[in-house]
Image: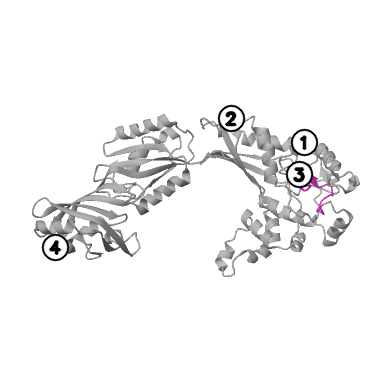
Amino acid sequence: QAPTHTSDLDPNMTVTGSDGPGVTPGIVSDSDRSSAIATDPLSPPLPHNPRSLCSRCALRYQGIPSSDPIYQSSSDIISSYITGRHPDLDPGQVLAHHVISDQSPVICPACVGILQHGNEVRPDVISCVSERSLYSSYSSLSSYALAISVPPVCALREAYYTAVLSRSSPPTSIKEVLKSILISSISSLLPAVFSSTSLFHVDLALNHPSSDPEIIMNLSPYLRRTLPLNISAKRIRQSNLTSNKFVDRAINVMTSDEIRQLSITSVETTPISVSVRVYHDPILLTGSYTKYCRDLSQTPWLLDEDERKIGNSVQELIVDPIISVFQAGDRYKFHAAGREDVDVRMLGSGRHFIIEIVDPHVIPDRDSISTLANIVNESTDRIQISALSLAPDYAAEFKALQLGAQIKTKSYRAIVWLSSVIARSECERISSMPPFDIHQLTPIRVLHRRSLLSRPKTIHSLSISPINSHFAIIDLVAQAGTYIKEFVHGDRGRTQPNLGSMLNCQADILQLDVIDLHTNI
């Protein structure tokens, strides 16, 4: 797992009601809410003392963009800033009149304390994000991308305040405000600079589980509206009512009047918890392998958790000698453009493969990658790899791999046994045939893991070279996905036509090699 670090924001916070610290206010009634709107249209009708928004939330609901440096100022400076934006209004009518000071123990109900108490809370978040132990194992760290998730209750309260304040657009995002504050504060502490396109990620998750009951109480009546009409009762019961996804869907199906009737409860004294996860995007190591033995599977072949059918695999022979260089543990995935059977050799230019290395802590340079290929090739004579490199385009590399498995044709060579002596004229007749189609039912040997289908395939060319009276070498070029063994022996009639039926005898295959892979015939 990626490194994580956790902390709590301001664990000594207490909720303050209109009568002072320690008094938990009740929910405002509809009549009180209407009265508050009528007397002070710029003030949010909250269930708290009217001095109820933290300074940054006051800015957010004034539409100040997250990039404005005013967000990093104290509440007094922010209050003066907002008052200056409304010189024609009485100070009592300006939202700044209701700003919670930095020294107040009141928890802001709009952001549940996330943006509050700048000089007290921000260092706690910064200490989490800039904890050196999170980054010490990553070499050559030059940039980072920052992602933030906030509690689902923030979306609920944002919709509520936007509705009761009759705002035409939602306020500035909590996540974007916090991101701008953190980037400016931690860049000097981290061994890297912020970049939205960085491959190294810092994920900051803020949680406030004590607000979950408020979400369930307010939004559960709208669950059915958010789901398809034909959804099952079981699916409804499995719905997660406290997820960000559900909260967003529920708010989208509610009317403005319904949102205004939400019951916004007092903020619990439970602190916001913070967790930080850092990781590097996967990197792709790509190349081609050739296989020179007939007892090697492409990936580990396990019968049970600890029992192997085959002692080793192509994957392990390639990855095991080099994975330690990336310091990613055993977190990798092996992908290849198709596969050959255990007893089939892979020759020619080889088969394209990708090693997807998850969360690498070290990224080797180009010269080091060439050295890795030598390490693999010197460690075994059963396989060889070539053209090893780091893939620059993640999506394009996998698309090429997929197309390689679907479109290419393959050249094969096999040694076959024939029950009858085949005249040379028959061999010449077969070798001069134009391309032809065959139909293959799913082979019996793979029927336990593949669907029963009839697969049309094309044999582009076929030639037979006798070795003696009953043995011959066949060379053929076939469409990708053709079961060559079954084409030779017929699989009890499940492949038609097959080599045996074409020569009017029984046929079986002794050895098979993939000579090469082609994208164009």
User: Residue 442, how many percent across, how many down?
Assistant: 30, 62
Q: Residue at x 84, y 43 (%)?
A: 85
Q: Residues within 10 Å of mark 4 (few under 14, many from 20)?
A: some
Q: Residue at x 35, y 44 (%)?
A: 352
Mark 1 = which residue? Answer: 73
- Residue 371 % position (x, y): 37, 30
Q: Indicate the amino acid at tag 3.
A: Ile
Circles 4 and 1, Cβ within 8 Å, touching? The answer is: no
**Under tag 3, what secondary structure?**
loop
- Name the residue nearer the viewer: 197 or 450: 197
What kind of element bears circle 4?
loop
Q: Point out the tag, 3 or 4, that comes first from the N-terminus.
A: 3
Identify the colour scheme used: one colour
Q: Are marks 3 and 2 in contact (CB under 8 Å)?
A: no
Which amino acid, by three-letter code, is at mark 4?
Cys
Judging by the rendered image, the residue that carries numbered circle 4 is 505
Q: Which residue is mark 2?
A: 191
Kindly report which numbered mark, 4 or 1, lies closer to the viewer in this rendering: 4
Give the Cα distance between marks 3 and 2. Answer: 31 Å
- Marks 1 and 3: CB-CB under 8 Å? no
Q: Earlier in the sequence, mark 3 or mark 2?
A: 3
Residue 243, visible in the rendered structure:
no
Q: CA distance from mark 2 to mark 1?
A: 26 Å
